[in-house]
Structures are given as structure tokens and as C-alpha cells.
Amino acid sequence: MQNEYDAVIVGAGHNSLACGLHLAARGWSVALFERGAEPGGAVRSGEYTHPGFVHDWAAMNLSLFAGSPFFRQHGAEITRHGLEFVPVQHCFASVFPDGKWLGVSTDLEATASRIAALSERDSATWRWLVAEFPAEAEHLFGLLGSPMSRRGLAAFSWRLWRARGTGGALALSRFLLSSPRKWLEETFERPEMHALLGAWGMHLDFAPDIAGGALFPYLEGMANQSFGMVLGKGGAGSMSDAMVAALRARGGLVECGAEVVTIRHEGGEARGITLADGQEIRARKAVIANVAPSALTRLTGPLEAGFDRAMANFSHAPGTMMIHLALEDLPDWRASPELRDFAYVHVAPSLDQMARTYSEAKAGLLPSEPVVVVGQPTVIDRSRAPEGRHVLWVQVRMAPAVIRGDAAGKIAARDWADAAEPFAERVLDLLEGHAPGLRARIIGRRIVTPDALEADNPNLVGGDQVCGSHHLAQHFLFRPARGHADGSTPLRRLHLTGAAVWPGGGTGAGPGVLLARRLAGA
Ligand SMILES: Cc1cc2nc3c(=O)[nH]c(=O)nc-3n(C[C@H](O)[C@H](O)[C@H](O)COP(=O)(O)OP(=O)(O)OC[C@H]3O[C@@H](n4cnc5c(N)ncnc54)[C@H](O)[C@@H]3O)c2cc1C
């Protein structure tokens, strides 16, 4: 290993890999140092329950990556190094306690007729929204894919105003400020439609009444309807593996089991890093840290009072608990056998239930009726389990990092070591109600609590799966802090990347590639 590179990158999450690959493609020498045993951060796969059953440790849905500006630019190279997408036609569905269900498939007629069975008016609205989506997408994806600065925002507003006029620009601004509930209740009449789409807000921390949250249910609904979803063949981790292979092929270094303990600087300029084993690596042009904001100043020491305070005050969303199941067979969903074909089944039956669950988790309580996202990846990608068998990716959204009590008053445990089993049983009871016989099909299971997610990857503070709340006060110009949405820090040559930086969490590689382009050109 050399001891000097153009760019030294802390952590090997997909944003680091995207950043490193773009820099390497522009001729920079690049080295990534990852504390974990393998690269990929939240995008990894492995046999976590039983041999032959491949589970996605965290992210499962790679649609953001497949649709990203980064993939448009570097996708051919990554594909050559082994990434293959598996398309999903039946994207997401919701089940309801009365036995109803609703689901979005890429076949517009199929989706519209399911909605029409509940409401002709909502079905017509859905068709209208889908027809309008390409024009909306141009602006929204343009915003989400652009650098975030006052100038960038002004340019976006100018383009929007020219295309839409004052009324249109204000309408879009109002939508961007709306809560999921505000937009959903104004748009659709049926509560099932509100829940079907509102569940997407819960993948972030946009509970139904949080301002600024309408965008995500809208985009997920429209994008899944219009383009479908994609998974990674053989597991989401295949995306990280292919990026690592592409980077290594360009001479980049990806070193695992290498924790960065210090970012060294002198005279207001970052100079390099020190690893836990004492090795020092120098950076000629940049040190790039893919760490949670609160961890940055632990590596650098105090930098500038205002910046340090903003990093320390960066707030996190409630945690996630994962339950990985190896199954004899898929769940038999009570509402319809068609649900066996869907990538995601949401068990989040109403906006009120989601709002309650979020408040309970925020108050430190184990939710009495958790929001559950059931991923069925083996329906789409048969390569992940032995013939006829399946894995289930069960994401329990909104679990407290620190347990102060149980909203149902039944679980006495106040730490995750003791609460994991009874809380997982609560989730399985809920699923058993919607898919009787599920428990009897379980061959193996692994529970990953919020604190275990954080122990595996310290960027997931308290099990926060998107490294920081995306509420308005911490998004756009304010992610991670005003004046630093481009990843800059008070030190020259030190940059922050990863989900904590604009445009935020998910597998879209936005923070990594926007930074790499700023440093080395498009
Ligand atoms: C349970 C879960 C489910 C998710 N599901 C989806 C999904 O289906 N679709 C989607 O689009 N998004 C999903 N997400 C979100 C998405 O996966 C993340 O937002 C994204 O992968 C974050 O990537 P990143 O590059 O910012 O950093 P991370 O993936 O968080 O990686 C950061 C890396 O840096 C390393 N590191 C930190 N500090 C140091 C240090 N001092 N020294 C060395 N290494 C260090 C960590 O070990 C880690 O490997 C999910 C996330 C979770 C947790």
C-alpha cells in the first residue's frame, strides 16, 4: 500500500465508491479505508440465516441507483464488472385489516382497475397524475440531481418560473412544503390510497403530518408506476461488489478492516488520515469523509464553533429493526394470492396508524402496532434461495434507539438485548394475522436491532437508516448545515459525503457524485 494518494476516502459506502470511481475516471489516485470487514456500508448481502439463503443486510431496492445521474454516466463500466438489475413489475402493495389490498404494478390498467374497485374518481386521478408525471419529473429530478446552493436554487426557480409561470411555480413550491397527509387527502378520496402512498414517507422519517414529506410518496408512486423497480441480481450487495471491482480496475485501493481514527490537518488544510493501527496516509488533493456529522469532529477535533455545533446538533430519524427470514415458502397473504408477486408489501393500514407509530417511537416507546415493510426479493430474483425456498426482508420502521417503554404496556425490557425477541414476536404476530401460517414456514431468522445496525455501521446513528432526518430544517440548503450542502467543511481539502449531505439518503449516489464532479469536473 502506498502512503500518499490524491484522494483519501473514509468509509466504503456506495457514495464513497461512486465518488472514488468518478475521481479515478478523471485521473485521480484514490484510496478508500473501511472499518468493516467488507465494503458497501448499507448495501451488502450475505447468508445471514442459513447457507444458500442470501439476504440484503439493509437496502434492497436499487431503483434510485439505476435511475441516478451517476449510473447514467458510469453504468456501462459498473455493469461490465458484474452488476445486473432484475426488473420488478409488481412493485408495492398495502394490506388492510378488513382483507382489502391495493397494489401498484407497471401495467397501468392493472393498477387503475384495482383502484377503481374502491373509487372510480381515485382511479381517474391516478391516470391523470401518471400522464402528467414526465413534465413534473423533469423539474423534480432536476432539483434532486443538482448541486444545492443559493445560486443552484435560484437557477432552478428561474427555470421553473419560465416553464410554468408564477402560478405554476407557486403550486410546485406549495407541494414541496406539504405534508404527506395534506397532499394525499387533497388528491384522493379513499383512505386506502392515502395509506398505500403514505407508507413511502415512512421509509424516510416523513410521518403523515410532517411538512415537506409529500414529495416522497408522490415520487415513489409515480416512478414505480412509470418505470417499475429494480433489484440487484444475486443481492443488492452485487452493486457494491461491482463498484469495488470497477474502482480497483482503475487502480483504486479499497482497504477493509481499516478504521480511520484521525483526520490530520495543519494550517486550516486537511493533510491525511491515521488508521487505528497507526498507519498514516497522506492526501495530495482531498480527504473525503463518509461519516455521520457527529462523528466528523471526533476525527478532526474542534474546527469552527458554528460548524461544530451544527454537526453536533444534526438530528437523526427513529431507528429501524430488520428481521431476516429464511422460509420454506412465501407467505400466503390472506387478502389475495396476487400479493405473493409483489416486491414490497406494506403493513401500514392508515395515516393515523403511521402517525401514532412515529410519535411512539419518537417518545422512546416500542410502537404498539409497528409499520412493517415486507420485502419478497426471491419472487423476483430466484437466485437468492434454494429451489422452492424464499427469503423475506422484514423492515420494521420507527423503532426507538433508546427504549423508554412499551406503547402496548406489555414488554418490560428497556434495552434491545432483551426487547429484540418480544418486539420481533409482535411483528410476526401482525404478519401472521395477514398471512396465516407464516411462522410455521420459518427455517431461520436473524433479528438486527437498531443498536446492532449502528454497531455494524456507525453512520446509522440509533439505527437511523438514512443517516439523518430529512425534515425541511435539515434538507435542501440545510443538509447537513447551511453553507455546507456541497460537502465543504471549514478545513480546505476536507469534504463530507454520504447520506447526511444533500441530496440525502438512499442508493442514488447523489452526495458522492456531486462532490466528485465539484472536485474533478463532470
Ligand atoms: C435497513 C436499511 C434499509 C434500507 N433500504 C433501502 C432501500 O431499499 N433502497 C434505498 O435506496 N435505500 C435504502 N436504505 C438507505 C441507503 O442504503 C443508505 O442511505 C445508503 O446506502 C447510504 O450510503 P452511504 O454511502 O452514504 O454510507 P453507508 O452505506 O452508511 O456507509 C458508510 C460506511 O462508512 C464506514 N465508516 C464510517 N466511519 C468510518 C471510519 N471512521 N473509518 C472507516 N470506515 C468508516 C461504515 O462502516 C460504512 O461502511 C436503507 C438503509 C438501511 C439501513
Image: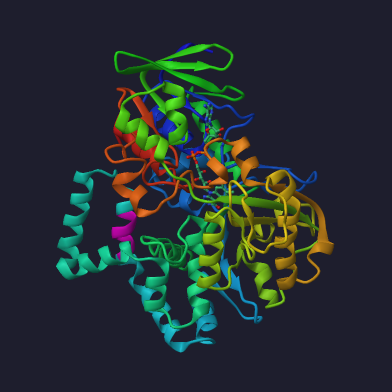
Of 35 and 231, nearer the camera is: 35
- Please state the horizontal and vertical placement of residue 57, each as a whole percent of the image: 64, 45
Residue at the (54%, 73%) spot, across then down: 350
Residue at the (16%, 62%) spot, across then down: 161
Q: How is the image coloured?
A: rainbow
In the displayed structure image, the side of residue 8 where residue 169 appears, left or right = left
User: Where are the magenta residues, as a range?
Assistant: 136-142
Residue at the (74%, 54%) spot, across then down: 325
Of 177 and 232, nearer the camera is: 177
Residue 130 visible, this angle: no
Residue 401 visible, this angle: yes
Instruction: Please identify the quadrant where the C terminus is shown.
Output: top left
- Please state the horizontal and vertical placement of residue 304, each as a whole percent of the image: 31, 26
Q: Is residue 458 above or below residue 100?
A: above
Instruction: Please identify the quadrant where the N terminus is shown.
Output: top right
Number of numbered discs on residues: 0
Q: Is residue 138 part of the magenta span, yes or no?
A: yes
- Please state the horizontal and vertical placement of residue 278, each as a whole percent of the image: 55, 11
Q: Is residue 386 above or below residue 481?
A: below
Task: Please name the predominant secondary structure of the magenta segment in the image.
Answer: helix
Residue 443: quarter of image: bottom right
Q: Is residue 208 part of the magenta span, yes or no?
A: no
Of 301 and 199, nearer the camera is: 301
Residue at the (60%, 56%) spot, across then down: 365
In the displayed structure image, the side of residue 490 where residue 260 appears, left or right = right
Residue 149: quarter of image: top left
Q: Is residue 520 above or below residue 450?
A: above
- Please state the horizontal and vertical placement of residue 140, each as a whole percent of the image: 32, 58
In the displayed structure image, the side of residue 236 where residue 7 appears, left or right = left
